[in-house]
Amino acid sequence: MKPVPMLEIINLHACVGDKPILKGLSLSVGAGEVHAIMGPNGAGKSTLSYVLAGREGYAVTAGSATFEGADLLAMEPHERAAAGLFLGFQYPVEIPGVSNLLFLRTALNAQKRLRGEAEISGADFMKLVRVESAVLGLDMEMLKRGVNVGFSGGEKKRNEAFQLGMLQPKFALLDETDSGLDIDALRIVSEGINRFRRPDRGVLLITHYQRLLDHVRPDFVHILAGGRIVESGGPELAMRVETEGYEGIAA
């Protein structure tokens, strides 16, 4: 019997306002798999991540998306998060007045309550903080500051990788996590993603560049153009994009 994919998208159509963006996108991601989505600007990559996460203003007009067999599109955003879905933003937002530590403990315990699990104690939370922050080079003073307030672009992306490690979701949607990173920050963030990889988890990486995939080697690469996936393959497909560009592949 074929296992149920972690994430299965079938003929998904979505629009922003009156503008159709996704036009029949289908994709299946199994447990333990890392899939990369590449494509030109305006192809619908970020729209896909926002639709799956339940962002307001993105309307699904046809098709389906299921997560571990459950109807993802019928869930509220907080229910999707509690079910194990994590979204890493291309442009992480700042939340003045709310410290990273307070934000994460509140989010983690809110998800645990929705799942009927015991909340994490302060001592256990801080143990987890010390482990995850050390991996990503975030010091305690940064974690006491408002979420992303005063952070550089690279620090914001490292902070998102820290959130990923702290929340321990089942599935990570990472929207251009490599955007704005220098070589050292790219390596550190990639290490965080690779630590997240497990046989019972899934990852969907949205990226423009091969350089991230040199560090986080995907199982599959998909080219998204015109609101749908036009070609799929292994890591070698990303190399083709690097040398040929999207025009020949997405034609």
Image (cartoon, rainbow, N blue to C red):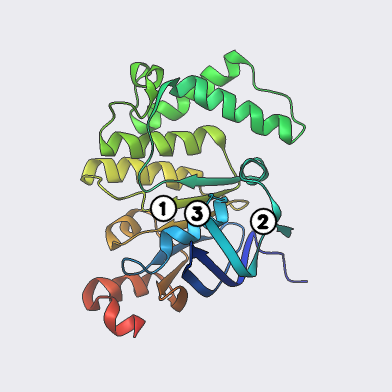
Identify the image quadrant of the C terminus. bottom left
Residue occupying the point 27% across, 81% down: 247
User: Is 37 rendered above or below residue 247?
Assistant: above
Which quarter of the figure has residue 152?
A: top left
Q: Seen from this angle, which residue lies furthest top?
A: 123
Residue occupying the point 42% across, 39% down: 161
Task: Kindly identify which residue carries mark 2.
Answer: 72
Residue 84, image x and y in percent?
Answer: 63, 45
- Which residue type carries mark 3? Tyr
Residue 232 can be seen in this image: yes
**Cα distance between the residues tagged 3 and 2:** 12 Å
Q: Is residue 188 left or right of residue 120?
A: left
Label 2 crowd (10 A; few <14 / some 14-19 / many >=20): many
- Which residue type carries mark 2? Leu
Which quarter of the figure has residue 8?
A: bottom right
User: Is 104 rendered above or below residue 63?
Assistant: above
Question: Earlier along the polypeptide chain: callout 3 or callout 2?
Answer: 3
